[in-house]
Image (cartoon, rainbow, N blue to C red):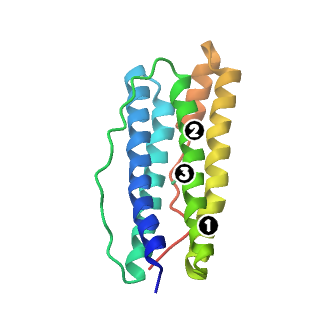
Amino acid sequence: MLHDSVVNLLNEQVNKEFYSAYLYLDMANFYAKEGLDGFENWFIIQAQEERDHAMLFRQYILNNGYEVKMGAIADPYVAYMNYKEPLEAALKHEQYVTASINAIYAEAQKVNDYRTIQFLEWFVKEQGEEEMNAEDNVRKFELFGEGKGLYMLDQKLLGRAYTPPSLVLD
Ligand code: FEO
């Protein structure tokens, strides 16, 4: 049995992860319109990963015998003014998601919910990687985001391939 306060936060996280997928698809749309196929590809795969995260939270709630509540997903559209803005917004968003995961972890600790703490360990590590990747994109753009460098960076991001999450819940 889980504590209601933890279940509520887990349900909110399902929505946040689906929103993340939606946000990153909006960024992919922006780059697609600009003809930057690599950046588009990177964000489409990022959106797939976010959907995976949402499904893991959903499954965890179900596996513990609770109801999953699907809230409305907010409109993610932003009129980006340049190629760098989505990269910076993505980094900020990952920092927000990290804080959100940490808040669930803190609540689980407060109510001695060791099962949820163990489940969240994977996400704590994952958020470290997510922030590192988002930071890397900003840094690479600052270094190579113009002229021929932009073309090469776009080609590099085109090489990102989807891998399913290492965490599996039956
Ligand atoms: Fe699901 Fe990008 O964190």
- Horizontal and vertical percent for residue 163? 53, 57
Question: Label 3: how many residues lie within 10 Å, few (<14), some (14-19) or many (20+)?
Answer: many
What residue would you read off at disc 3? 97
Q: Residue at x 41, y 75 (%)?
A: 61
Q: Residue at x 64, y 46 (%)?
A: 131
Q: Amino acid at mark 3?
A: Val
The C terminus: image quadrant: bottom left
- Horizontal and vertical percent for residue 157? 56, 35
Q: Earlier in the sequence, mark 3 or mark 1?
A: 3
Q: Is residue 123 above or below residue 97?
A: below
Disc number lying in front (3 or 1): 1
What residue would you read off at disc 2? 92
Q: Amino acid at mark 1?
A: Ala
Q: Residue at x 47, y 46 (%)?
A: 45
Q: Is residue 163 above or below residue 63?
A: above
Q: In the image shown, does 166 or 95 lie closer to the viewer?
A: 95
Q: CA distance from mark 3 to mark 1?
A: 14 Å
Q: Quadrant of residue 64?
A: bottom left
* SS for dot 3: helix
Q: In the image shown, does 126 or 166 lie closer to the viewer?
A: 126
Q: Amino acid at mark 2?
A: Lys
User: Is the CB of mark 3 within 8 Å of ligand 1?
Assistant: yes
Residue 98 visible in rendering: yes
Q: Residue at x 56, y 32 (%)?
A: 87
In this image, 2 relative to 122: left or right? left
Question: Label 2: how many residues lie within 10 Å, few (<14), some (14-19) or many (20+)?
Answer: some
- Horizontal and vertical percent for residue 71? 30, 57
In this image, 24 relative to 130: left or right? left
